[in-house]
Every structure is written in structure tokens, then in C-alpha cells.
Image (spheres, rainbow, N blue to C red):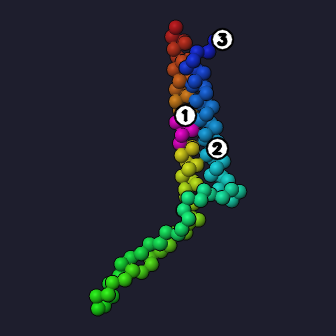
């Protein structure tokens, strides 16, 4: 049984998609369980400040909240793993469509 090129490319894309999805899931799981540290993208905490006008017309800022860099780095790690999962899903969908298309084309002839 001879395979045509679109079928081979389709199965290759399907396997690549499964590998990307598995990699993304493993990355998210390892960050969530603490096995690997999240990527170190943010090196400082983000501080939210709000302007305040005091009696007498004096202007100042008060610190409303702080978003720790650890939370930002974990969020960035999850976003990275989610992008791997989304890319794997797209590769897998295209691969499945190619294999289905080549199978239908083969049956039509």
C-alpha cells in the first residue's frame, strides 16, 4: 500500500501536534507542582499607585497594591505552555484534515 505525500505530511503534522500538546501539558504540570521554576521574565514587583490630593492642595501617591514577580512569572509560564498547547492543537487539526482529505481523494479514484 503506497502512501501519498499529503498523507505522510498529515500524519507527521498530527504526531507533531500531539508532541506539542504533551510538551505544553508537561510544562504546566511541572510549574504547578514546583518541579521546575517558571521562566524568569519579570525581575521586579509591579506596584500600583493611585494619585491622592490632600487638604491644602498637596498632591501625593499612595500604594494601592503590589503584584509579586513570582505570580507574574508563573502566569507567564502558564501562558507559554498554553501557547504550546494551542499550536499543537492547530498542527493536529491540520494533520487530521490532510489525512482525511487524502483518504477521501484515494477512495474517489
* Crowd rating for badge 3 (residues with CA inside 10 Å; few <14, some 14–19, many 20+): few
Q: Write the start and end of the magenta stretch as one range.
A: 86-91
Residue drawn at 47 percent across, 72 percent down: 47
What separation in Å lies between label 2 and label 1 (alpha carbons)? Answer: 14 Å
* Magenta stretch contains residue 9: no
Give percent across and percent down for residue 81.
58, 49
Give percent across and percent down for residue 82.
55, 48
Q: Of the two numbered discs 3 and 2 on the same chain, state the one appearing first in sequence.
A: 3
Label 2 belongs to which residue?
A: 23
Asked whether 54 or 42 is in front, the reply is 42
What separation in Å lies between label 3 and label 2 (alpha carbons)? Answer: 33 Å
Q: Compared to 57, does 10 lie above or below?
A: above
Tag 3 secondary structure: loop
On the rendered image, what quadrant is the N terminus found in?
top right
* Magenta stretch contains residue 87: yes
Q: Compared to 27, does 20 lie above or below?
A: above
* Residue furthest front as drawn: 43
Residue drawn at 53 percent across, 69 percent down: 45
Asked whether 7 or 107 is in front, the reply is 7
Asked whether 2 or 107 is in front, the reply is 2
Label 1 belongs to which residue?
A: 91
Q: Compared to 7, does 81 lie above or below?
A: below
Task: Residue 99: name its quadrant.
Answer: top right
Residue 44's tag is none
Give percent across and percent down for residue 5.
57, 18
Give the dominant element type of the magenta stretch: helix, strand or loop.
Answer: helix
Residue drawn at 58 percent across, 30 percent down: 13
What separation in Å lies between label 3 and label 1 (alpha carbons)? Answer: 25 Å
* Residue furthest bottom as drawn: 56
* Crowd rating for badge 2 (residues with CA inside 10 Å; few <14, some 14–19, many 20+): some
Residue 1's tag is 3
Q: Is residue 76 left or right of residue 55?
A: right
Amino acid at each position: 500500500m503506497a502512501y501519498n505525500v499529503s498523507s505522510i505530511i498529515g500524519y507527521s503534522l498530527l504526531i507533531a501536534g500531539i508532541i506539542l500538546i504533551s510538551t505544553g501539558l508537561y510544562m504546566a504540570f511541572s510549574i504547578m507542582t514546583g518541579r521546575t521554576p517558571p521562566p524568569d521574565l519579570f525581575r521586579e514587583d509591579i506596584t500600583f499607585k493611585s494619585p491622592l490630593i490632600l487638604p491644602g492642595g498637596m498632591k501625593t501617591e499612595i500604594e494601592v497594591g503590589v503584584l509579586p514577580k513570582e505570580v507574574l512569572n508563573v502566569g507567564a509560564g502558564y501562558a507559554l505552555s498554553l501557547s504550546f498547547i494551542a499550536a499543537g492543537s492547530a498542527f493536529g487539526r491540520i494533520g487530521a484534515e490532510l489525512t482525511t482529505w487524502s483518504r477521501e481523494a484515494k477512495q474517489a479514484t
